[in-house]
Amino acid sequence: MMNIAPVKLSIPAKAEYLDMVRAVLFAVAGKAGFSYEEIEDMKVAVTEACSNAVLHAYDATEAGDIHLSFLQGEGTLQITVKDNGRNYNRIGIESSRPTLHGLAIADAVVGGLGIFMMQALMDEVQVNSDNGTEVVLIKRLSRNEEMV
């Protein structure tokens, strides 16, 4: 397979720029062969990751950015959402964290449902919070739905 360079996008960490993220995701995922339904799932997961950065990474007085990378692999799309703000991993998000299955909604961590939603919609979710926060979302191609 030929090496495909990642598509990169940097936006201000403001909610009004999230439509650009969804547009780029739609274009990249469509070219990679994902179905409309798969792309819609990815849009929700990526919007959630970006929204966390908008809401928690930077305080109201500082201008911050969100850096995204869309990397097409062998039957996969890896989307990385990175900010350089405060580590907002205060709810203990770990890729090894137990899923919501078996928990009553009332027992879920307040504000922590976003990670469960991302895990439900994507094949893999990794969160690194060493320097800012980086969320890596991976979706594998399934060939049983109508393509875009």
Image (cartoon, grey):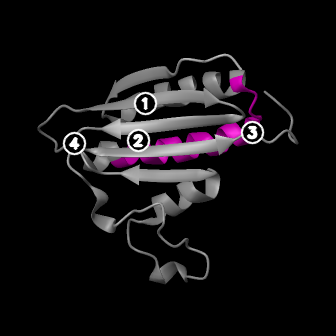
Question: Which mark's residue is nearer the viewer, 3 or 4?
Answer: 3
Above or below — where is 24 with respect to 136? above
Q: Amino acid at mark 3?
A: Leu
- The residue located at (55%, 71%) in the rendering is 99
Q: Which mark is residue 50?
A: 2
C-beta proximity under 8 Å, tags 2 and 1:
yes
Q: Amino acid at mark 4?
A: Gly
Task: Identify which residue, 2 or 62, lies in the foreground.
Answer: 2
Above or below — where is 75 with respect to 59? above
**Residue 60 point in image, percent of width and height:** 16, 42
Sequence-wise first label, 2 or 4: 2
Task: Identify which residue, 123 or 118, lies in the foreground.
Answer: 123
Sequence-wise first label, 3 or 4: 4
Q: Quadrant of residue 15?
A: top left
The answer for how far apart the CA atoms under marks 1 and 4 are is 14 Å
Question: Which mark's residue is nearer the viewer, 2 or 1?
Answer: 1
- The residue located at (70%, 21%) in the rendering is 31
